[in-house]
Image (spheres, coloured by chain):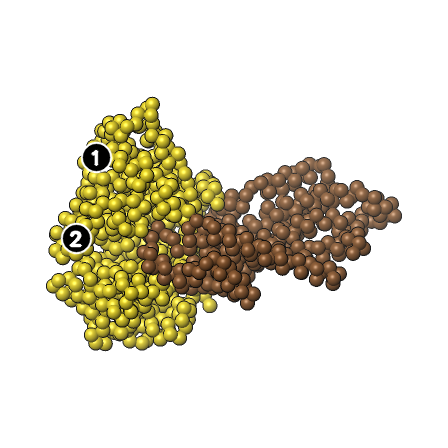
Chain colours: A brown, B yellow
Amino acid sequence: MLNYSLKRLASAVPTLLILITVAFFLIRIAPGGPFDSEKALPPEIEANLEAKYQLDDPLVVQYVRYLGDILMFDFGPSFHYRDWTVNELIAQGAPVSFTLGAIALVLAMLFGTTIGVWAALKQNTVADYATMSIAMIGISVPNFVMAPLLVLAFAIGLGWLPAGGWDGSVSRMVLPSIALALPMIAYIARITRGSMIEVLHSDFIRTARAKGLPEREVLVRHALKPALLPVISYLGPAAAAILTGSVVIERIFTIPGIGSHFVQGALNRDYTLVMGVVIFYGVLIIVLNYLVDLVYAWLDPRIRYDN
Amino acid sequence: MRHGRLLAAILAPIVALPLVAGCGAPEDAATPKPFDLPEPIEPWHGQDGRPLPEALAERQVLQRGNGEEPQTLDPHRAEGVPTANLLRDLFEGLATTAADGRIVPGAAGRWDVSRDGMTYTFYLRDDGRWSNGDPLTAADFVFSFRRSVDPATAASYGRMLAPIQNARSILAGELPVEALGVEALNDRTVQIRLDDPTPYFLGLLTHASTYPVHRPSLEAHGDDFVRAGNLVSNGAYRLVDWVPRSRIVLERNPDYHGADEVIIERVTFYPIEDENTEFQRFRAGDLDWTDQVPANQFRWLNQNLAPALSVSPWFGTYFFGFNLTRPPFEDNLPLRRALNLAVDRTILTEKVTQFGEIPTFHLVPDGLPDYDPPVPDAAEWTQDEREERARALYDEAGFDDDNPLEVELRYNSSENHRKIAVAIAAMWKQVLGVRTRLVNEEFRVFLQNRQMRRRTEVFRAGWIGDYQDAFTFLELFHSEHRRNDVGYANPRYDRLLEQIAEERIPARRRNLMVEAERMLLADQVVLPVYTYVTKRLVNPLLKGWEENVMDFHPTQHMYLLRAASETLDEGASADDAQSRESAEPEVH
C-alpha cells in the first residue's frame, strides 16, 4: 500500500508539470493582454506596466522564472486585482468555495443515495418512476435557471432567506448550497438506483437472503457498500469541481469563491491568477482521485486482495 | 454564461409577476415586503434644500451595488468606473464635484489662474487633514503628482496629467519626476504649471490620478498601503473593511474638513457584476443603490418600480467605426454615408435598447456647458428621406441589387450589442440590400482586432468621456492616437487638434472643436447611434444626490429619510429597521 502511494505521488509530478506548461503557454497565446481596455494606453505607459509586471522578458525566461516561483509556493501578483497576490486571492476564495462545496457534497450524498436506494427498492413502481423523472429534470435543469428560481421563491417571494452575498452566516449559505447540490442529488440518485438494482440481483445477495438474514441487514451490510462504488468514482472529480466553486452560482449569489476566477481570470487575461487556480484545481483533482482509490480499496475487497 | 443571463432575464418577469401580484394584495399592506417601495416622509427639506433633522432616518447606513470588483484602491493606478466611485468617497483632489456635477473647491479652498491660463495656484484649506489626523500639506500634493507620473508607479491613467509641464517626458522616462511642473510655494500653497492652456484642467483635478496619497503609510506598507487598516485618505470617508469580491466598507471620516455636513455614517460597496443578481438583491431590500438594471426590462421596471428607477443622459456615445484602411470603406465616402443614413436610430433606441437612449447623428454628446455639437442636416430629415438619399449614395458607391455590398459587422459578445447589430444588419438589408455577416468576439480579442485594423470592416465602439470637454472625444481620431481604430489619418484634422490644444481664447477654441467634429462627420469615419444613459434603481428614501452627465455620485451628499409609513405604523418601522439590520453584513 505504501509502495503504491509513493508511486502515485511520483506520477503526480510530471502530470502537474505538463499541466503548468500547457496552461502557461495557452493563456499567453490568447490574443490581447491583461492591460488592454477600451481606453487604450499610450505606448510609454504600456511599457511601464509591462516592466513592472516583468512581461517584457522573453516568454521562455518568464516561464522558467514562474517555475522557480511556484517551487517556493509564490504564485505572483494578480494582474487584474492589483492590490492582491494570487496566493491571497486563493486563500480568501478557497475557504468560501470549500465550505459551500462541502455542504453541497454532504447534501448530495445524503439525499442522493437515500433517494437512489429507495427508488431501487421500489423498482418499477409509480414511486420509482416519479422519483427518477424528477431526478432527470434535476439533471437537465441547469443551475442558472434553478438558482434564480430559488431566489425568486425564497428570498423575494417569501422573504425567508437573503438573496445573495456572503458573510459566513448559515442563512446566506442555504440557497447557494441547495442550488449546487440539486443536480448532484439527482445524478447520485440515478447512479445509486442503477447499481443498487444490479447488486440486489447478484448471487451474494441471494445467498445472504437464503441464509435467512433480515432484509435490513442484507441491505445495509451487504448491498449498500458495493452499490456505492460507482457513486464513489463519480465523486472524485465531482468533488474537485464542486469544491473549487461554480462560476454560475457565485455570480448569481455574489459569492466570493474561486470559481469565477477560472472564467473571469481568463477573460481578464490575468495570467498569474489563471495559473494559480489551474494548479490549485489540478492538485485537488490528483489528491481526490487518490483518496477515491483508497476508499475504493476499502469498499471493495476484490481490489484490496488484488493488491 | 450569456445564455444564463438571457434565460434569467426572460424568466425573471414571468416568475416574478404572480409573486408581486400576490404579495402586493391589500391584506399584506401592513407588513411591507421589500419590493413595496417606501415613500419618504413629507416635508423632508427646508427652504435651503437641506434635509430637516426630524425627517432623517435613524440609521444612516447605505448599501451600494458597484459593478465589478475594483482593480485597485491605489488612486494613481486605478481605472474603471467602480473604482472611481469608491475613490471619490475615500479621497479628495484639489477640486471636487458638487452633487450636480459642478466643479467646486476640494482640498484647495480656492485657486487663482494666471492670465495666460498656464499657471494655477491652489490654496489648501487650513483644516485639511488626513484620516489619521496628520495635516494635509502642499508637499503631499507635490509628492503625489510626482508619484502619479513616475514610470515606476506604472499608472495607467498617468496621461490624465499630460497637460502639466514635462509630464509626458517624465512618463516616457526621459526626465526625472522632479522636473514636473508642480511646486509647493509654502506649506499650504501648490502651484501647477501647464504646457498648454487646458480649459478643462480643473475637471482633471477631480480624477483619481490627481488625488493625494499619504507618504508615510506608503513608505511603511509599500504596495499594501491600500489595505483596510493601512489606508490613510483625505476624503469624506475612510476604509474600514475590504473583503475582495464581497464588500468594501467605508465609514465617515471625522477628520474630513466638511465632516459636519456628511450625513451617511457608513457605506458598503458591493461588487455585483451580474445585473439580474443586483436587481434581485435590490428587490430583496439588500441594496439602496444599483450600478445598473437588467437590460430589456424597461417596461416592467417602469410599471412596477418607477419611483426607484433613475435614467439620465450620460457623457458617452455608442457608435460604429468604419475601418478606413481596408476595402470596402477605404476611399469610399458615399458607401459610409449610405450605411449611416440607412440606420433608423429611433427604432434602435425605442425597440431595442428601450431605456430612453438618445438617438444621435454626431459624436460628442449634447449637454456640455460650452459646446454645441455640429448637427448634420440628416438629423432633421425624416427616415424616409434619409433612406432615399442612402439608396442614391449606395448606387454612387458602385453597389446595387445585382452587386450587393458584403460586409462584416463586428462586435464584442454581449446581449445588447448583438441585438443592435442584428437590427442594423436588417436595416441595411431592407433599405440597401446589403449582405451583412455578424461576427462576435470575446472582448480582448475584439479590442486587439480593432487596433490592428487588419480584419475589421465595421465594428462596434463606445466612448465615455474622461473629462467634461469635447476634446476627450475628438482626440480619439488623431492619426497617432492608440484608440484611432478607424485609421483616420487626416493631416488637417491633426493640425486642428494641435491648434485646439494651444488655443487660449475659449470662444476660438470652441469654434475649432466644432470645426473638427464637423470634419469627422463630413468624412463619416463613424456611424453614431445613440447617447448613453445611466440607469439604476435607487431607494426612494435616499436623497441628496442629483443626476449629472458625468454620473458622479459621492456618498457625502446623500442621506436617508424616514419612510412616511414609519410615523403611521410603528410595527412597520420596526420591521423596516430589522430588515435593514439583517441586510447589513457583519463587519469585523
Mark toward the start of the polypeptide (2 vs 1): 1
Residue at coordinates 16% horizontally, 56% vertically from top-left? B502
Residue A178's x, y, as percent? Answer: 57, 51
What secondary structure is found at the residue carrying circle 2?
helix
B319 to B194, vertically: above or below: above
What secondary structure is found at the residue carrying circle 1?
helix
Residue nearest the observer in this picture, A22 or A86 = A22
Residue B55's x, y, as percent? Answer: 30, 60
User: Which image quadrant: the C terminus of chain A?
Assistant: bottom right
Dot 1 amino acid type:
Ala
* Image position of B494 (left or right of A98): left
Q: Chain of mark 1?
A: B
**Alpha carbon distance from label 2 to label 1:** 29 Å
User: Disc 2 designates what residue?
Assistant: B499
Residue nearest the observer in this picture, B170 or B246 = B170
Q: Residue furthest right?
A: A211
- Residue A191 tag number: none
Dot 2 amino acid type:
Gln
Q: Quadrant of residue B428?
A: top left
